[in-house]
Image: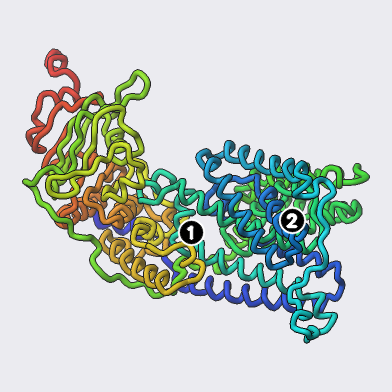
Amino acid sequence: MAQSAQALARETIPPAAPAAAGLGRFTGLIGAALLVLFLAAFPLVVTSQYYVHLLMVIAIYAILILGLDIVVGYTGQVSLGHAGLFGVGAYSAAVLFLHFKLGLWWGILAGIGVTAGFGLLLAIPALRVSGPYLAMVTLAFGTIIQIFINEMTPLTNGPLGITLPPARVIDFSLLGMQAPWGAAGRKLEFYYLVCLCLLLTIVVVNRIVRSPFGRAFEALRDSPIACDCMGVSVYRYKVYAFVVSAALAGLAGALFAWSERYVAPNSYGFELTVLFLLAVTMGGRKSRAGPLIGAAIIVMMPNILADIALVRIMAGLIAAVALVILAVAFLRRQENRTAILIPALLCIAFFPATLAMQSVTDFRLTVFGLMILFVVYYLPEGIVGYIREKLPFLRPAHTGEGTALSSSGEALIQQGGRAGADPLLKVEGAVMQFGGLKALAGVNLDVRPGTIHGLIGPNGSGKSTMMNVLTGIYKPTDGGVTLAAGAGSGKRLDGLTPSDIALSGVARTFQNVQLFREMTALENVLVGLHHAFHGTIFDAILGTPRRRREEREARARAMAILDFVGLGSLAQVEARNLPYGKQRLLEIGRALALDPVLLLLDEPAAGLTAPDIAELITIIRKIRDAGITVILIEHHMDVVMGLCDRVSVLDFGHKIAEGSAREVQADPKVIEAYLGSPVADAAE
């Protein structure tokens, strides 16, 4: 029976397809080469200055949207202030020329630096909130910036705006010579500079998101609590993401100012914010192609909406396609036919609506809003995500550092101290009160090093609350928590942040699995190894030898940990695609990557099959044998009996018993807590 269960588990695990991953990297290189070739050849093939300028605006917007994708796509925050940051970058360059006659290059530096500073000032207070509150704060920032630009006439020239001369990329007159590429080439200098900035932005964003910073951004989106408990400060990395995004918005703004040669306050209003958000959601998050597609859409869309005849033609084509898809779905009785009914009818209804309109321009914000709703609801991964779903070979490779993955080094760092020494963890009179409810009421615990200490009790007894107190998710109302830091000394944990506690050597798993679902098993463990990376964000951008060495060593160690928990063959499988039992083991592996002295396991056997539980018990014993102290919350009494050196029992927030597993099991108070009053049972 156990063998059949194991076979079934193996069958449910999706294969890691290294060939497809390699093809994904190859496709990315082909796409990059085609982009460079297209940008270089476009002005030579299409000589119209109008279309060259249009492509230049698309490239400038793409720079900003690539940065916005870090905030929206990777960290999962909704920012409505990037139009304001875009305006700050544009005015930084324009004001520098207006007052000091400094040209393009100084304007670009000012745009990046000043806007990054504004982004930091906005991020420090704004990112303490999330969701709709963050959206409102950033929207207010954009409005304030627009009013500030309009009212600060001595600095910004107020409503009149600032006019700039033609951009001069290289001033050959200072060298006493003419441009070697002639007058025609001089007109394209700025175009190629914008293209170069776009390509550099793609490289920079690529390196950041494939670095420990990028993994931290993704982790805090999927599970902020788990991210903090891995030693990665959620707030700090939100600020990092926002500042990088703001710097790119400033670069785009400075280039836009010199491209248009005129800036005015009304150019950076709410409509532009909606366009940027539409570009990210429609193009596709977490990709480099998505922002390019999104930028092209939002630049071309106003031109399309200005021509009612063209709008009607497009609406007719969309309605025809929707009608065909709907008819095929119902004729073939497809399972998703009811799901596509509403979007198909909306597409069909759009055509007669355009026939009744004389102009769509006045309704463009409504059109953009409907497009955002449509994409968010029916195309949540955007155009690029939809294409990747239909064509799996286009999915990006997860390794980012080559296909060869090998393990090296010890999976576990041996921890000193064995049973009989002073307590490794001491909890004194811990109280956790929520209003009138005391989830913990003066609980004392002494956890000896090198042991497995069980923490059991009925549902609602306060076990998970104790876990949250020990890891900083809850700050205790009263009492203290001390972790031994050496002979005769200790470190107070109560009052520290979860990330600080994690870096002190306390790791944990969760009652409800808190994996980073869109990341692979290997990437999940690499987040746990975040403490091993000492490079700065500039190391990530420049790809320094230290950055490459740390990444190589961390990947080898991560593979060793995955081998330790039996997941080495599943390193490239996304966490959400793993069977539940493997997800439990992965969460333990990720916690072990912190090199903890104390590991807290919150019901690790919950929902597991008998073979999985046997495998789990073996792994926990190996963890203890490495000198790592374990606190185990578990409802499976056979697991507690077979593993725990000492057991504490909680009931309604009080510790009612403590001792060996067998002593606790026979304690009358424990029996009463689990089974009810012995007197009542006897009366029956």
Given contact means CB atoms under 8 Å apart, are the residues at marks 2 and 1 in contact? Answer: no
Under tag 1, what secondary structure?
A: helix
Q: Is the residue 586 above or below the residue 678 in the image? A: below
Residue 123 vs residue 28, the one in the foreground: 123
Residue 169 vs residue 340, the one in the foreground: 169
What type is the residue that disc 1 sits on? Answer: Gly
Residue 591 on image: x %, y %: 30, 52
Quadrant into which the C terminus falls = top left
The residues bearing labels 2 and 1 have C-alpha atoms spaced at a distance of 34 Å
Under tag 2, what secondary structure?
A: helix
Q: Quadrant of residue 447?
A: top left
The residue identified by callout 1 is: 214
The residue identified by callout 2 is: 95
Residue drawn at x 70%, y 44% is 145
Q: Nearer the viewer, mark 2 or mark 1?
A: 2
Left/right of residue 307 with respect to residue 654 in the rendered view: right
| Mark positioned earlier in the residue sequence (2 or 1) | 2
Q: Is the residue 192 above or below the residue 82 in the image? A: below
Residue 268 vs residue 589, the one in the foreground: 268
Residue 624 vs residue 148, the one in the foreground: 148
Residue 646 on image: x %, y %: 12, 40
Colour setup of the view: rainbow
Residue 98 on image: x %, y %: 78, 58
- Label 1: few (<14), some (14–19) or many (≥20) C-alpha neighbours in 10 Å: many
Left/right of residue 9 with respect to residue 448 in the rendered view: right
Residue 143 on image: x %, y %: 70, 40
Residue drawn at x 72%, y 63% is 255
Q: Is the residue 631 above or below the residue 672 in the image? A: below
